[in-house]
Amino acid sequence: MLALALLVAFASCFYAVIAQEAAGFDASYQEPWVLNVSVGGMFDEMPFCSRVCSLAVLESTGCHPLDTACFCATPTMAPGIESCLSWFCPVLAYYEGSSLYHTTCNTGIRNSSAPLVSTVTAVATIAFVAVTLRFLTRIPPLSIKWGADDWLVLAMVPIAAFFLASILKAVDLGFGQDIYMLTPRDVAEMTKYYHFEELGYVLLTFLTKMTVLTFYLRIFPIGKIRQVVYAFIAMCTCLLISIFLAHFLQCVPISFIWEQWEGTLVPKPKHVVCGVNRDNLNFVFGITNVIMDGSIMVLPIPRVLKLDLRWQKKIAVLFVFCIGFLITGIAIARISILLNGSYTNNTSWNLVPVVKWSAIEIFLSIAITCFPQMHVLAKALLGTCIKFDTATNNRPGKLSYGVSSSMHTGVSHSKKQPEVLYENLELGFK
């Protein structure tokens, strides 16, 4: 019965949209047609398309249009109206129809912005502390030599700040509330900052992967693994550029990505092209992200298993590398949440879990890239003996990272160069 009602609604709304386009997007259209009759109550106050949807769903419940106690208590009424309005009605009709229904039924005001802000700021603080501790190892007395991974982390700092600011600004504009409780202008502005948050997420996702890969290059100075790492860096670079451009150019002109949420309140630009399906793009990106994460985390494990270490220490080293699988798990959870948040206009409410888990994934990824350096700092604070490299190519007191002193001095040694180097600790194979 509900399917038949929605079919009637689709036919009615399709006619309404065609009529609207023929009239030059006149927001005041009220051509007499199917269901353009007075039934009383909130339905007479709705725009034509919203009324068609609502009455079609109401028909499936068996309730009278004036019996608010009946249809408000029917569990299929609210999701039915939401689905119908999202699929078949112009955005302004969606706002007004949803708002009238929820106001009439007194469903309450939902707001999850406070928990979202608390979670995001908490994980951002963790990342900030981790990055600060990382760079403490680059100044005296440790003075560890800077590498490509350090510069990548430094480049991520302003991008991460922009990512955080975009989330907080979107929340300030109403993200975390039901979209029909906001003004169309606020929805458009909120969508703009959500778009910025997506762009920041793409950049930071691949930059953290490249940071881990460049770290591998420092701890594995020789071996075929370096060729594999370079191949992964090339893949990450290509994926970053392609996925970033796909997100950035979802619509041309770009401003239409958020201006479309104002409906007919703003003039529609000429020659608008929206050739990217956001849901499909996010799904493909999510799957790619998980595969890349898992592959990068697995990459050093065979090498570590061959190290000439006691099994207790070997487990500790494996733990440092495998903690990155936590991020892979978060990325998988994000995909499932993203799919559940799609196919609806109520993005300001349904996409809150997506933004929350995106922030958790990004900021914890940044923190995890700093764990090895934090380990060195912890050893120093606990009084562990730290060896300083006095190689001629480094100033006195500077700790070598990823290369042995013999490589700097040019002195020939009979000892075979170790295949794994980390913070002046040489690890050989069995």
Image (cartoon, rainbow, N blue to C red):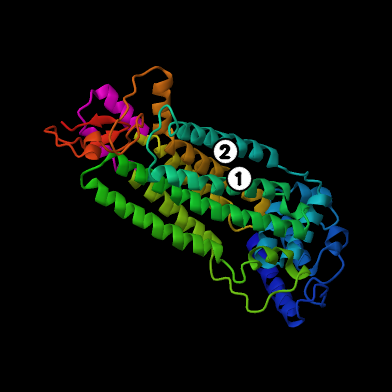
Label 2 sits on residue = 124
Q: Assign a secondary structure to mark 2.
A: helix
Q: Which of the two residues, 30 or 231, is positioned nearer the viewer here?
A: 231
Residue 184 on the magenta span: no
Is there a contact, CB below 8 Å, between mark 1 and mark 2?
yes
Q: Position of residue 395 (x, y in %)?
A: 35, 34
Q: Bounds of the magenta span? A: 297-320
Left or right of 222 in this view: 269:
right
Q: What residue sits 58% from the left and 56% below the top? A: 342
Q: Hey, which quadrant is residue 328 in on the image?
A: top left
Label 1 sits on residue = 164
Q: Earlier in the sequence, mark 1 or mark 2?
A: 2
Quarter of the picture holding the N terminus: bottom right
- Residue 5 badge: none
Q: CA distance from mark 1 to mark 2?
A: 8 Å
Q: Assign a secondary structure to mark 1.
A: helix
Q: Position of residue 131 (x, y in %)?
A: 49, 36
Q: Predominant secondary structure in magenta?
A: helix
- The answer to whether residue 112 shows anywhere in this view is no
Amino acid at pointer 2: Ala
Residue 305 on the magenta span: yes
Q: Hey, which quadrant is residue 141 in on the image?
A: top left
- The answer to whether residue 101 shows anywhere in this view is yes
Q: Which of the two residues, 380 or 353, is positioned nearer the viewer here?
A: 380
* Few, some or many residues within 10 Å of mark 2 (<14, 14–19, 20+): many
* Few, some or many residues within 10 Å of mark 1 (<14, 14–19, 20+): many
Q: What residue sits 62% from the left and 71% below the top? A: 253
Whether 70 is drawn above or below 270: the answer is: above
Amino acid at pointer 1: Leu
